[in-house]
Amino acid sequence: MTDFIKPVEGRAAVIDGKAAAATIDAAAKAGAGELAAALGRPPCLAVVLVGEDPASQVYVRNKIKRTEAAGMRSIEHLEPADISEADLVALVNALNADDGVDGILVQMPLPDHIDSRRVIDAIDPAKDVDGLTAESAGRLMLGAPGLRPCTPSGCVWLARKALGDLSGRSVVVIGRSILVGKPAAMLFLEQNCTVTMAHSRTRDLPALCAGADIVLAAVGRPEMVRGDWIKPGALVLDVGINRIDAPEKGEGKTRLIGDVAYDEAAERAAFITPVPGGVGPMTIAMLLANAVRAAALRAGLDEPAALAAL
Ligand SMILES: Nc1nc(=O)c2c([nH]1)NC[C@@H]1CN(c3ccc(C(=O)N[C@@H](CCC(=O)O)C(=O)O)cc3)C=[N+]21
């Protein structure tokens, strides 16, 4: 079950997020098959992308590929960067009203002239596969059932596989975004962890991390978390996806690095997620799982067994 955790001699074991995600994709596929039989159609995930940011286009393309590979229907709406807020909300409302759509994801960030909160909160909470609406966030806060944000769910899932029961573990979450930091803190709290939320105003972050069994970095600053911050034996979850120039690969080439100085941290941690190939692939896996869950819930059916067993 945990064959995606690869031991490395004298260093942290590497958590292979791509391999872990394949397990979840397979469960989503099994669930999607069950639902397709019950509903007479496969679950359907709609993605809305505004503008032509190349990195966003890559994520959306990956999502489409994995959605279809899991036996689901994928719908894309590619909208121009100058679309009005009203038109975008109208599109979301049309997807809400479409009974053939089970999940809606509006890719962030949106252009500056659009109030993203207004667009997100237009999404029917029953179709909120990103878990970003006020309704979903409130449900998470309350510990009530609901769709949970994908990246933090992926992190907690990996942490449970690496460490088992998380009760009493100390977690430092670095970053307080709506997409990752805040929901990650709530999800670890739900696992009975002792959670500290750190951010740009936190004093002496290295000392804070030194006591943490789990460090989750989600700030978007390349290699900000250094190896000597990490408690020996800790679990390091690197959510950062930073694209930097890589002239060594050739002119104009780039590569991805995380928010953690990987080689340093791997010297002390017991487990670490790499970038790429760590938390990123898990995000899409959890999105697929949420799309299947949303389809089941909307149809008044139980969560498919394959997903419940995850
Ligand atoms: N409403 C919304 N929900 C999101 O979940 C959301 C979003 N907006 N906006 C953008 C960020 C970013 N994000 C990623 C998902 C997967 C990878 C991923 O699979 N990365 C691969 C590498 C991909 C590559 O090579 O470019 C990896 O880390 O191995 C990365 C980034 C989801 N986001």
Image (cartoon, grey):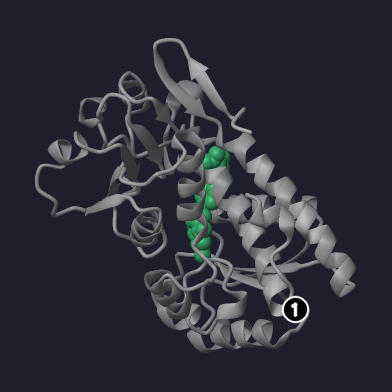
From the top left corner, tell me how far across and down residue 241 is, in percent: 43, 44
Kindly identify the residue that appears in the image at 72 percent across and 79 percent down. 300
Question: Which residue does the image show at 33% across and 39% down from the upper left?
Answer: 214
Q: Nearer the viewer, residue 25 or 301?
A: 301
Q: Is residue 202 above or below residue 110?
A: above
From the viewer's side, name the closer residue of 204 and 244: 204
- For the point 62% across and 83% down, the residue is 91
Answer above or below: position of 190 versus 106.
above
Placement of 96 over or under 56, stated as above or below: below
Q: Provide the secondary structure element on which disc 1 rests.
A: loop
Q: How many marks?
A: 1
What amino acid type should be assigned to the residue bearing mark 1?
A: Ala
Q: Residues within 10 Å of mark 1 (few under 14, many from 20)?
A: few
Q: Residue at x 44, y 26 (%)?
A: 247
- Say whether residue 18 is left or right of residue 164: right
Q: Can residue 282 be seen?
A: yes
> Dividing the picture into quarters, in which one does residue 56 lie?
bottom right
Q: Position of residue 33 (x, y in %)?
A: 84, 59
